[in-house]
Amino acid sequence: MSNNDVSPDVVNRIMSLWRQNATIWQLNMFSFPRTINKGFGTTENSTEEELIFLASVSKIVILLELAHALEIMGIQEIPMTYNMLQEAKERDGKWVRAHPELYAQAAIPLTEVFRAVATTSNNSFTREVKELRMKHIGQEALADNYRAMAPGYEMLETTEGNRHWVQSGPNTGYISKMANLLELLVLRYQHDTVSEYEAILVECLMNNPYDFGFCFTHSELGQSLIRKGYRIFEKTGYYPGVTWVSALAEQDYPVLLVLATVVTILSPEGEVKTFWMYHNIEVPVPWETIVENGITFPNEEGKWYKRYISRIIGKLRRNFRKEITRKVSKALNL
């Protein structure tokens, strides 16, 4: 999809919402953002039906679909692009420098692709994975595969300049479906019925060494459980400002900061419990704009917006971690 495919009515509606929202927030730009909706649940007791922006939580279904496909595709590496290497350096520079045998080559093993996407949510690697699959089966077939695994999930289609906002609902879905996928994967791993790449995926998600500031794994309770022999499998999702999902903008949510996670805990005795949680937080409309193909829209990468997010994200992450820790502790009767 290109930006030229967007209906002028859709653009005008979204821009109108942005302008209304901007007027409010320009008057209150130093006030704390407002959490407009949130949810928590388990795979045993889930009533969540709200369609939300999933951020990187959706990489569970993307990697699982790839793991299934690799059994018949027969490839073991993909070409390394400049964007892949640069993002790997930004997200995980120490690891990249320590492994020149992986990152100083023209191609990168798919085992490392799984690790980078699962542990650090590398978006460039993710795009290459989807491109790889679309070349083999086509975009519609890939989207159908994702929906079959996680009903309600809409695949994110990258547009020029990475401006996805022109789509109706990219990367939206039901977080409970992602939790179900993770739990099933862990149960199959527990009983040694996973494929080679499924095993790689689940092991990358286990006791993830990277602390994103809001994940359960690196909470005090999470680290305590790991020391006691528990294994924690977690996929987090964070996005600093979703301005490009018109399906959300039409609900008067033109700009959202998203924090989300799905967590499966495997006890030393073999008991499995899975939880999910998300926060949608209303934040100011970015003042700086970009003009692309004649359409003007807020710039999520602008200096003003990045400064604003940097001032608030620490507290938002800490609040998220406190809440999920409290709720998981209660659910586990700890």
Image (tube, rainbow, N blue to C red):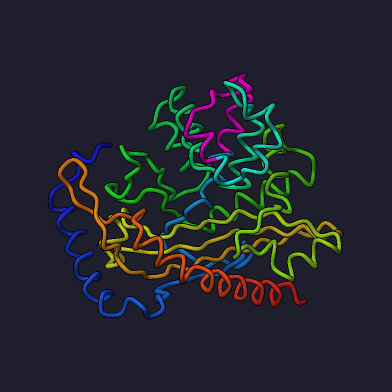
Residue pictured at 66% horizontal, 64% vertical: 216
When the figure is inspected, residue 256 is found, relative to residue 293, above or below; the finding is below
Q: Nearer the viewer, residue 306 or 263?
A: 306
Determine the image quadrant of residue 270: bottom right
Residue 36 x, y percent position in the rendering: 39, 74
Examine the structure image and report whether residue 70 is included in the region drawn in magenta: yes
Determine the image quadrant of residue 320: bottom right
Q: Nearer the viewer, residue 145 or 235?
A: 235
When the figure is inspected, residue 26 is found, relative to residue 103, above or below; the finding is below
For the record, the magenta segment spans: 64-87
20 relative to 70 in the view: left or right = left
Prevalent SS, magenta region: helix
267 relative to 181 in the view: left or right = right
Residue pictured at 66% horizontal, 61% vertical: 274
Quadrant into which the C terminus falls? bottom right
Residue 76 x, y percent position in the rendering: 64, 22
Residue 160 x, y percent position in the rendering: 30, 37
Residue pictured at 30% horizontal, 56% vertical: 247
